[in-house]
Each structure stands twice: as structure tokens, then as C-alpha cells.
Amino acid sequence: MKHLLSAADLSLAEALAILDTAEAMAETQSRQMKKLPTLRGRSVVNLFFEDSTRTRISFEAAAKRLSADVINFSAKGSSVSKGESLKDTAQTLNAMGIDAVVIRHHASGAPHRLAETDWIDVPVINAGDGTHQHPTQALLDAFTMRRFLCGAQDGSPAANGTTLAGKKVAIVGDILHSRVVRSNVNLLHTLGAEVTVVGPPTLIPVGAETWTSRLSYDFDEVIDDGPDAVMMLRVQRERMSSAGGGYFPSPQEYTRAYGLDAARLARLAEHAIVMHPGPMNRGLEISAAAADSPRSTVLHQVANGVFVRMAVLYLLLASDEGLDA
Ligand code: NCD
């Protein structure tokens, strides 16, 4: 595979190859000298049409740790605000001689378009498109789950080939607007986990009943089922037409039914972890008690994101097989 567009494209062998390579990358990052020469002389463009803090910085850090040159492009302040199309932007970058594109775009399918057309002829990595996919987020989440739920269970490296067979994962909240949940449902299924998506009916998309996950509207029932990981999703107010947008009666009611408060936190199994892709709405979908608790892996997810993105860049740009395992 030449591109990373969707978590659904990854076979079990390919997913494990990325996760195992990420463990090898992590090992190099505990050294004092963190920079590897692997991508010296190559240029990676971060093409961000939508706001981002951690994903953009994480891709930048990953490329730089591999010695690539990084060009950061954000739509704000560029000719995109003058109406330049994705095609012209891509062709302009292509003419400058780049080796990979990391793209985040508000339109679902934009990365596929780049990969399919001849506008640009380099590997394309999807860093989040609309409400569609965010494959490197799912990979870093799976990497984190392998470390905390399998083997030593303390966040230390997982053995090569570790899957998530039989692990129960609950993904909770604004399912409708989340590309993180769609990528996670795909990848976690491939890795053998049992996923339940939970949210209010108004924030569950049509068709979710056909996903490879179980569907519930009752967070308390799902907690009683004893999940190994609870992944809270951000309520994406910027994708709702007006604040709240009629998707739920009030923030207080949302929190009461779907928030991870101290009481729900206390009912989780001792080994269970609390995840969130960030940015968090503290006090809405996640309480400070949960976000800051020892079982929260939020900052581990951020750290692991760099290792996973190093692995993806390495496999796409420097290994002969690409992502094929
Ligand atoms: C997510 C995204 O942008 O899809 N954040 C991220 O990449 N860390 C989730 C979100 O914005 O809620």
C-alpha cells in the first residue's frame, strides 16, 4: 500500500507491522540522541485545511525525528483563503518537489482525491478528513491499548504481534461527527477487540447499526459490562449548526447521561483505562476527576502518537514494501 487513507484498508498483518515498528521507534526515542537519519533529504508537507494542535505537531515531530524536512501549510493565511482549489494547491506543492503529504481537510474524501488523481504523485497520509477517517489516531489508540491492557499492563512496551483479542472497548459520546470513532471501529475489529459505541440517539449516525461494533444508548449499562478501555469523544460543537444545535437538551443533561464523572469512573474495573483523543471539553464529556486520574492515558496517547507517525512515515517512505506486510 502506498498511502494511508483509511483504517479500514489495513489488514491484521499490516496493522501489526505498523504497531510493532512503532514500538521499535519508541525504543529509539528513549535515547538522549533522538534523531534518526532515515529520511534525511526528504521533504514532508503538512497540509492542514482544518485547525489542529496535537496532530499537526505530532506529525511534524515524527518527520523531524526521522531527519526529514517539514513544510507546514495551513489554509488560513494561504491562497486557499483567496479561493485556490485543492487541485491547484496540490499541483503547486508537487512542482516544488516533495516526498509525502500529510493532509487534514474538512471535506470527507479529500485525501482519497489527492491519492487517486495525478495532481500529486507521492504517498498521502490522512490526518483527519471531515467526519470520515483518522487512521493514525486509531493506530496510536491501539498502540496505547496494547501497552496498557496486554502484557505488563503498566504502559511498558508490548511484545511484537500482540493483538487486542477479546478486549472490551467502549467508545462514548458524539459518534455522529467523529472520524476517530470510525477509524477505531475499523482497526479495533481487525485487531480482535469487542467494541461498543455509546451515545444519545441524536448523535449516532444512520447506519451505525451495520458497523462491526455493538450499539448502545445507555452508558451505565455499558459500564456494567466491564469495559477494559473507555474512550470518551469530544462533543464537536463546531460541527453542530448552532451551539448545542438541538442534539441534546442541555450540557448538564448530556453530562448526566454520557459524561464520565467521578461516580462512573469509580465503577470501572481496576485495570480499565480512560482514553480521549483531545481536545477535551472538561466538565462536559469528561470530568477533571477522570481526565486527571492515574488511569487516564490521555498524555500517553499524545506521546505514542509520535512513535506511530514515525512508523507510518518510515514504512511509506523508507521501506521497500510500503505498508504491505
Ligand atoms: C480529533 C480530530 O481532530 O478528529 N482530535 C485529534 O486528532 N486529536 C478529535 C476531536 O477533534 O475531537
Image (spheres, rainbow, N blue to C red):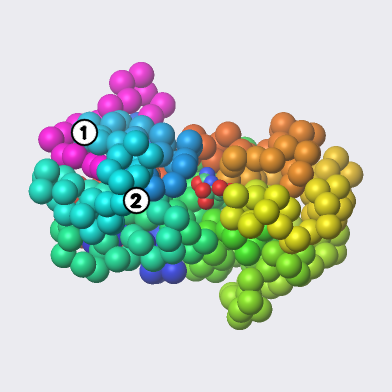
Distance, label 2 to label 1, CA atoms, is: 16 Å
The N terminus, quarter of image: bottom left
Magenta range: 29-45
Residue 225: image tag: none
Please tell me how crowded label 2 is: few (under 14), some (14-19), or many (20+) other residues with Cα within 10 Å.
many
| Residue found 23% across the figure and 59% down from its top | 87
Disc with the residue nearer the chain's start (2 vs 1): 1
Name the dominant secondary structure of the magenta segment.
loop
| Residue found 78% across the figure and 39% down from its top | 283
Callout in the foreground (2, 1): 2
| Residue found 59% across the figure and 76% down from its top | 211
Describe the element under mark 2 as helix, strand or loop: strand
Q: Is residue 49 left or right of residue 196?
A: left
Disc 2, ligand 1: is the CB inside 8 Å? no
Figure quadrant of residue 88? bottom left
Residue 162: where, in percent of width, then height? 49, 56
The residue pinned by badge 1 equals 69
Residue 28: where, in percent of width, then height? 35, 31
